[in-house]
């Protein structure tokens, strides 16, 4: 009798050997964007000009958002009006909604920093954003590699035994 190799899905989700299940694979496009985001964050942390640090960190966050979008969406056919990645992130990954709102609010400041406006951002704002982007990318990585929550088990109604009662007593509970 030939050996029937289990499929990846069964290996990942149906582990009867007591080991933790494997996380689902991250799509290649999402993994590449997340890697770009991490490299951008390293570049931002090394920048000496606060405007460059802020703008580069914000772009790293945008690449991180793009990674989540690449993992959770499929391209649509036809032409549609362009939408902000931050708006899409809040729709596609509601658990990232607060992050999306936070980074959307910093887009104008990033544009001012990229334009070279001398008082666009302070040292502190740039440093804070680098730390925030680092936390955001950590949350994204966790979200991209977690197993989906198992579906809740349906409740069985009308069984022969019920809690606190005697099974098979032949009596029906009063309504």
Image: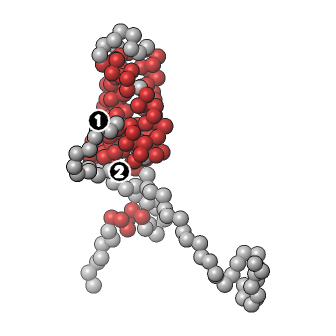
**Image x and y of residue 138, in percent:** 43, 38
**Image x and y of residue 153, in percent:** 54, 68
Q: Which residue is located at x 46 percent, y 40 percent?
A: 97
Q: Pick whichever, 39 or 93, lies toward us.
A: 93
Q: Quadrant of residue 100?
A: top left
Where 73 falls versus 36 (above or below)?
below
Q: Residue furthest left?
A: 78
Residue labelled with disc 2: 72
Q: Residue furthest bottom?
A: 170
Q: Quadrant of residue 142?
A: top left
Is residue 44 in view from this perspective? no
Q: Badge 2 local density, few (<14 within 10 Å), some, or many (20+)? A: some
Dot 2 or dot 1, earlier in sequence? 1
Q: Which residue is located at x 76 percent, y 81 percent?
A: 173
Count of numbered tags: 2
Q: Which residue is located at x 46 percent, y 23 percent?
A: 128
Q: Residue furthest top?
A: 118
Q: Badge 1 local density, few (<14 within 10 Å), some, or many (20+)? A: some
Question: Which secondary structure, mark 1?
Answer: helix
Is residue 21 in view from this perspective? yes
Which of the image's four quarters has the N terminus? bottom left
Q: Which mark is residue 36?
A: 1
């Amino acid at each position: 009798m030939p050996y029937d190799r289990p499929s990846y899905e069964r290996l990942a989700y149906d582990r009867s050997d007591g080991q933790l299940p494997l996380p689902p694979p991250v799509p290649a496009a999402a993994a590449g964007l997340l890697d770009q985001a991490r490299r951008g964050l390293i570049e931002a942390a090394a920048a000496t000009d606060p405007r460059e640090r802020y703008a580069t960190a914000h772009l790293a966050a945008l690449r991180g958002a793009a990674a989540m979008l690449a993992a959770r969406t499929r391209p649509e056919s036809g032409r549609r009006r362009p939408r902000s990645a931050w708006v899409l992130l809040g729709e596609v990954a509601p658990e990232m909604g607060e992050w999306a709102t936070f980074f959307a609010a910093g887009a104008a400041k990033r544009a001012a920093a990229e334009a070279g406006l001398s008082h666009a951002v302070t040292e502190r704002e740039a440093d804070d954003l680098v730390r925030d982007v680092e936390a955001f990318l950590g949350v994204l990585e966790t979200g991209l590699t977690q197993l989906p929550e198992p579906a809740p088990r349906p409740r069985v109604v009308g069984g022969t035994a019920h809690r606190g009662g005697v099974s098979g007593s032949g009596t029906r509970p009063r309504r």
